[in-house]
Image: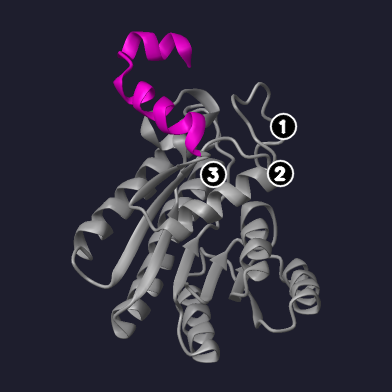
Amino acid sequence: MRKNILITGASSGLGEGMAREWAARGCNLALCARRADKLEALQRELQQAYPEIRVLVRGLDVCNYEQVFEVFRGFREELGSLDRVVVNAGIGSSQPIGRGHFEANRQTVETNVIGAIAQSEAAMEIFREQNSGHLVLMSSVSGVRGFRGPLNVYAATKAAVASLAEGLQLDTRGKPINVSNIMPGYILTDINRSTKNAPFRVDLDTGVKALVKAIDAEKRCAYVPWWPWTPLSHVLKAMPFGLFARAM
């Protein structure tokens, strides 16, 4: 079992849910996010519920790249090692291209792509020193193809994260470092709460349990929940462009 787990974006949503699930399984946690007050409240709750584990928290903006390295190294020093790093921090907002929202789209790309690269750099540096570790990159089913309108830039960032994961898998092939690309479908969080008609959306608890199960399996790529997103991902990839355009 991966004992010491670092999760970014752990103050809410999927990150917070995964922290609760791994805490219940006896894992030590290193939690970071921009909202330090929420992290501290979560820390108190988990330490009270599971006094046998360690829960460390630090504020972190993943777009502060120097801070990413400082926080990851600090957690490693406190815990002695990092067994798994979950690159979960990200934002879900993007806007249609050419409608005057460049700054919002730039922020989405900077957070979801460059922030993910910074986190991967910091994690892999530690894993290479340890000669062990599990890097988890949170992509999305939306990363399998381009999407129109408000999802355009967001989907592009998740495609980039998926490609980053696959490249790192090639880099670490045959080594004691695993890299997983996790591609969730619609799991109810604040990011997608306002999305109307989200297909096959599951509640947060169901989604988090499926996520933790998939991550613990340490497969190269996992769609979450497995059903229906694994078969649907193949359909989306194979669908002719004209049909895909009408469907989306």
As measured in the structure, the alpha-carbon distance from the residue carrying label 3 to the one carrying label 2 is 21 Å
**For the residue labelled by badge 1, is the local secondary structure a helix, a strand or a loop?**
loop
As measured in the structure, the alpha-carbon distance from the residue carrying label 2 to the one carrying label 1 is 8 Å
- Boundaries of the magenta span: 226-248
Indicate the amino acid at tag 3.
Glu
As measured in the structure, the alpha-carbon distance from the residue carrying label 3 to the one carrying label 1 is 22 Å
Identify the residue at image location x=47%, y=60%: 216
Q: Which mark is residue 228?
A: none
Which callout, 3 or 2, points to the residue nearer the camera? 2
**For the residue labelled by badge 2, is the local secondary structure a helix, a strand or a loop?**
loop
- Badge 3, how many Cα within 10 Å: few under 14, some, many 20+? few
| Residue 68, position as x, y percentages in the image | 49, 73
131 with respect to 111 (left or right):
left
Indicate the amino acid at tag 1.
Ser
Q: Residue 110: within the magenta? A: no
Indicate the amino acid at tag 2.
Asp
- Badge 1, how many Cα within 10 Å: few under 14, some, many 20+? few
Most frequent secondary structure within the magenta stretch: helix
Which callout, 3 or 1, points to the residue nearer the camera? 1
217 with respect to 31 (left or right):
left
116 with respect to 240 (left or right):
right
Tag 3 residue = 103
Cβ atoms under marks 3 and 1 closer than 8 Å: no
Identify the residue at image location x=53%, y=72%: 5
Tag 2 residue = 190
Identify the residue at image location x=52%, y=86%: 74
Mark sitting earlier along the chain (3/2)? 3
Residue 50 image-quadrant placement: bottom right
Q: Residue 229: within the magenta? A: yes
24 with respect to 45 (left or right):
left
